[in-house]
Structure formats: structure tokens, C-alpha cells
Amino acid sequence: MSYCVLMQEKAFIEKRETRVEIYEDHALFDGEYYEFDESIACETLRFHYNAKGNISKANTLECHDQKGTKKLIFQLGSGRVRID
């Protein structure tokens, strides 16, 4: 969640698009590789923040670990993200 907020802020501050790509065991935040702990598995999701910091599409991302499932919910427009 914090990396997504960082990408949104970066897009707004730098006035450019930033991409977020989340895969089962890793993610790319504006091209920077981040590997998940091996106990975590996520669905695939790709989106971007535009130069105004708005998200390209509303989404819900599910990630799983031994404790259960967490959902990251991205709101259209503002790009706000929350965890359920």
C-alpha cells in the first residue's frame, strides 16, 4: 500500500505518469523491482497514476499469506487505496 501511495505522490510531484505492475511474487513500481516475501502471493494487476495523481482505473487486489487474504481497494479518480 505504501509503495502505491508513493507512486501516486511521485506522479503528482514530477507531473508525469508512474506505472504500477503487481505480479504473484513481485511488483514493479515505476520500473523499480520489489520482491515479496515468499509466503505472500498476489493476483496480477497493472495500472498507472497520471500527472495529476489520478489512478487509471478502479481495482481490487487480493494478496494471500498464511494468515489469510488481504484486499487492497483502489478508488477511481482520486486513487485512494485502503486495506480490507
Image (spheres, rainbow, N blue to C red):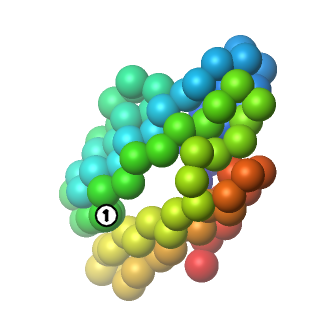
Residue 29 visible in the snapshot: yes
Residue 36 visible in the snapshot: no
| Foreground residue among 2 and 23 | 23
Q: Is residue 26 above or below residue 66?
A: above
Kindly state the secondary structure of the residue where label 1 is placed: loop
Q: Position of residue 42 (x, y in %)?
A: 32, 63
Identified by mark 1, the residue type is Glu
Q: Is residue 7 above or below residue 62?
A: above
| Foreground residue among 4 and 74 | 74
- Residue 10 vs residue 56: left or right? right
Q: Quadrant of the C terminus?
A: bottom right
- Residue 75 vs residue 18: left or right? right
Question: How many marks do you count on the picture?
Answer: 1
Q: Position of residue 54 (x, y in %)?
A: 71, 42
Q: Residue at x 77, y 31 (%)?
A: 52
Label 1: few (<14), some (14–19) or many (≥20) C-alpha neighbours in 10 Å: few
Task: Name the residue furthest top.
Answer: 14
Q: Is residue 75 above or below residue 36?
A: below
Q: Quadrant of the N terminus?
A: bottom right
- The residue carrying mark 1 is 43
Q: Residue at x 29, y 45 (%)?
A: 26
- Residue 28 vs residue 8: left or right? left
Q: Residue at x 68, y 62 (%)?
A: 75
Residue 12 found in image quarter: top right
Residue 10 found in image quarter: top right
Q: Position of residue 22 (x, y in %)?
A: 36, 48
Q: Residue at x 59, y 60 (%)?
A: 58
Residue 64 found in image quarter: bottom left
Q: Position of residue 34 (x, y in %)?
A: 36, 37
